[in-house]
Amino acid sequence: MHPSALPVRTQPHAACMSFQDLLAERLRQAPWFVVSAALHIAVALLLWLLIPPEVRRQLENAVAVLQEEPQAAPPPVELPPPVPEPEPTHDEPVVLEPSQVENPSEPTADSSDHEQPSTLSAFPSLGTNIAVGLGGNAGGPYGRRGGGGRRGSPPTERSIELALRWLRDHQDDDGKWDADGFMKHDDPASPACTGPGNAVHDVGLTGLALLAFLGDGSTLRSGPYREVIRRGVTWLRSQQQDNGLFGTAASHDFVYDHAIAAYAMCEAFGLSNYQLLRPAAQRGLDYLEQHRNPYGVWRYQPRDGDNDTSVTGWCVMAYEAGRHFGLQVNTGALQLAANWLDTVSDPSGMHGYTKAGEPSARKPGDHATRFPVDRGAAMTAVGLFCRYFLGQNPKEKPVMAAAAKLLLQQPPSWDAAAGSIDHYYWYYATYALYQVGGAQWTAWQKRLEPALLKNQHLDAARPNLLGSWDPACAWGDDGGRVYSTAILALCLQANFRYTRLVR
């Protein structure tokens, strides 16, 4: 029989069917998998009702976690293009040619492998280098600088600060201190400064003023007077000749100026750890070595056979500063300086000028009358101070203790009528007796500080003089007000400018 011939069942109308008949009819029409699904749902519901409530809650939580759709990651936020930052400001002072930039990878002054100078040094040997730090925190004799905190009585600290401000305010724009023209910086509304010095000593005065700022703890890199130091060093560098001489040989005693400038340049280089100054500092020492007498020490003219304790004192300190900061130093010359001090001294402790027993020099005319040589002991002070830096010990050198006693017999006294004002003597004696220490240093300091503090200009109604000292001293006509203010500020720095070398 053909399939089309199968009988067709007639469907009753839905309105005439009961609910059971309608459900049965729909089930007959549904696919078999729908029936299976319904049965599974019924079984699942039955099982769910049989599960304990605690387990049921755990399953609900698990199912909720599983069914939770993962959060779609938020679209990335587009950042605006980066804004270029300004060039950082580095503490790199420019003290040489503007085209030169210090290489940060250069060995520092506390490295064991030091950069060689750009010019051939006159020295045949290297001195011992003591490790140093930055910003004045150097070791060895320089260990007390830049430590912060109180370094003296409040009046002393104020006196130093006023002196440094006066020096700062009377520095030329090009960096030098003008011996005879410093008063051009005075306020014209107030009385002008007096006390000009000799114009030939600008180099030495600039070096001396720099030593005062360096002694207070500022360097080329840090401190309130870093810009003052930068300008001063830049000017000194511009005055250096090809042979290393700072300035010219115009005056008969030009080597004083050079030695003080070389001393300051060595400290500026080492305390600032500024490698671009190494060649300038080294050439300054090289010139001193070329100037020194063969088998002797120093005096006014190069290698003329004359020697004196005064010039030699500044040269020794320049050498010792250079040696400490890793520059080339002829240690044989330092031994000759020690021999010289033995030659010009005697068991009394007195050190002579060009020979044993000879007092300090005085200029022709009435200079010796106005400043009697027996009112001070400058050469003994120079000799004692240098002995400490040359590594000598009073326990092994009785002449040192004898020299200290002589200095205490001539304490500072600001007495113009008696001719006892000698800032040069006071400077060296102060530093020598600080090295001695103990009761002798205390006794000297008790005479020094009142003499200086009482005679410093402190009248705010005369602002041009405020902080300075009158050059009413043995060498005031040569150095002027800049000289007296710088060297007396250095005197007040004695208890922190150098460390005691003998304990």
Image: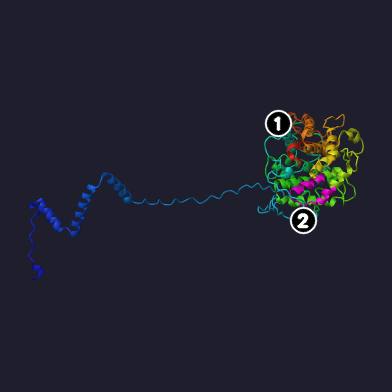
User: Could you say where residue 337 lies in the image, as x and y percent from the top left?
Assistant: 84, 47
Query: In the figure, 362 relative to 295: above or below?
Result: above
Q: Residue at the location (91% across, 33% down)?
A: 369
Magenta-tinted stretch: 314-336
Q: Give the amino acid at mark 2.
A: Thr
Secondary structure type for disc 2: loop
User: Could you say where residue 345 lies in the image, as x and y percent from the top left?
Assistant: 88, 41
Answer with the quarter of the image where residue 120 lies. Answer: bottom right
Quarter of the image that includes the C terminus: top right
User: Is the residue under label 1 in contact with that under label 2 (CB below 8 Å)?
Assistant: no
Question: What's the coloring here?
Answer: rainbow
> Residue furthest toward the right?
365
Q: How many marks?
A: 2
Which residue position holds label 1? 154
Q: Residue at the location (85% across, 30% down)?
A: 416
- Along the line of sight, the residue nearer the viewer: 267 or 390: 390
Q: Main secondary structure of the magenta part?
A: helix
In the rendered structure, does residue 499 fall within the stretch colored magenta?
A: no
Which residue position holds label 2? 119
Spatial separation of the CA atoms under disc 2 and disc 1 = 46 Å
In the picture, measured across the screen, residue 94 lies left or right of residue 338, that is: left
